[in-house]
Amino acid sequence: MKITYYGTSGSEAWPALFCGCRACMLAKQYGGKNVRTRNQAKIDDTLLLDFPPDTCEHVQRQGLELGRIRSLLVTHSHHDHFFPHDLCMRSSNYAEGTGDWKLQVYGNPTVGRIFEETVRQYENAEDFLEFHVLVPFEHCTTVDGYRVTALAADHNPPEQSLLYLIEKGEKSILYAHDTGIFPEHTWEYLRGKHLDCVSLDCTGLIRDWRQGHMGFTAVDETTMRLTDMGCIDGKTTVILSHFAHYGDFTHQKICVAEEPKGYHVAYDSAVFEF
C-alpha cells in the first residue's frame, strides 16, 4: 500500500493567500518543499482523500490522474477539504472519457447535504457522481476493494468530522486530518488494531494545540498512546501533515524537529510505501 500527498497545508495554504509573515516569506524565498497547497492525498491509485479547491493544480502540476479515481473519502465540509463545484466538472458537459461508471463519494451528513445542493446546479452531474453517507464507526467496502471505517474526529463540532481507517489485504492506514487528540470512543475502537501507517494532523507545529488540530506535543501524546495500546510499533510508518504557517518554520526546520523522533514529514508530491 502507498500514500501520495498532493496537498499538505492548512486552509490558507503556505505561503498563505494574504500573508506576509516570516514563514510565508521563507516559503516564497526557498520554494520547493516549502510551498504547500490545500490538503489532499491518495491511497494507491484509485482512492482519493478530500477534494480541495487546489485539486485542479494537483492535476495540472503534480500528475494526479482523476480518471483513475473510483472512490473519494471526504473528512468534513470545510472548503479546504471539500470544494464540490469542481467535483461536478466530471459531468459530460465538461469532461470526456470519464467512463460509464459513477465516482463514489463518501462523507458525513453535512458533506452529503452540500454535495446534493451543488450537484443539482449542474446538468447531468448526478449521472457521474454518487454519494454515500457515513457516520462514526460505520464501515463500507468501496468498489475498488478497500474496507473503510469512519471514526470520530475532534474537529468542527457543528458537524461530525471523520477520520478514516482504511484496510486492504493485510495492510492498514489511519488517516487522521483534521483533528485534535481523538475522542475517547475512537480510542476504544482502535484498541488492539495494528496499523501499518498513521497520517496525523500537525497544523499547530510548535503551538500547544490539542483540540480541533494538533501540534508537536499533541502528536507525541497521540503516538505514545497508540503505542501503549498496541496500535503502532517500530514498523509503523507515522507521517505528519496539514501544516500551517507559523514562526520561522520551513520544511527543513520541521524535519530537524520531528524526524529524530521517528516521524516522516509530508510535503506536496511526497510518496510513502508501507
Image: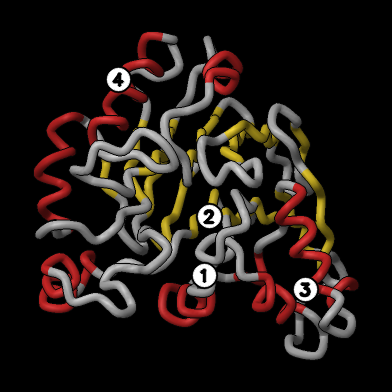
What is the number of the mark on residue 234? 4
Residue at mark 1 = 64
Looking at the rendered structure, the secondary structure element under dot 3 is: helix
Apparent side of residue 236 relative to residue 92 in the rendered image (left or right): left
Q: Secondary structure at mark 1?
A: loop
Point out the tag, 3 or 4, that comes first from the N-terminus: 3
Q: Earlier in the sequence, mark 2 or mark 3?
A: 2
The amino acid at mark 4 is: Gly
Amino acid carrying label 1: it is: Leu
Res. 42 mark: 2
Judge the density around disc 4: few (<14), some (14-19), many (≥20) Cα neighbours within 10 Å. Answer: few
How far is disc 3 from disc 4 in space, using C-alphas? 44 Å
> How much space separates mark 4 and mark 1, taking CA atoms?
31 Å
> Between residues 179 and 36, which one lies in front from this camera angle?
179
Q: Residue at x 23, y 46 (%)?
A: 205
Mark count: 4
Classify mark 3: residues with Cα within 10 Å, few (<14), some (14-19) or many (20+): some
> Do the residues under discs 2 and 3 have CB atoms within 8 angstroms?
no
Please say if 69 is above or below 161: below
Q: Gap in Å between the C-alphas at discs 2 and 3?
A: 24 Å
Q: Are marks 3 and 1 in contact (CB under 8 Å)?
A: no
Mark 3 — residue?
A: 118
Upstream in sequence: badge 4 or badge 1: 1
Q: CA distance from mark 4 to mark 2?
A: 24 Å
Dot 2 crowding, Cα within 10 Å, few <14, some 14–19, many 20+? many
Do the residues bearing badges 4 and 1 touch, measured as CB atoms within 8 Å? no
Residue contact at pointers 1 and 2, CB within 8 angstroms = yes
Residue 162 at x, y percent in the picture: 61, 41
- Pointer 3 or 1: first along the chain: 1
Quadrant in which the C terminus appears: top left
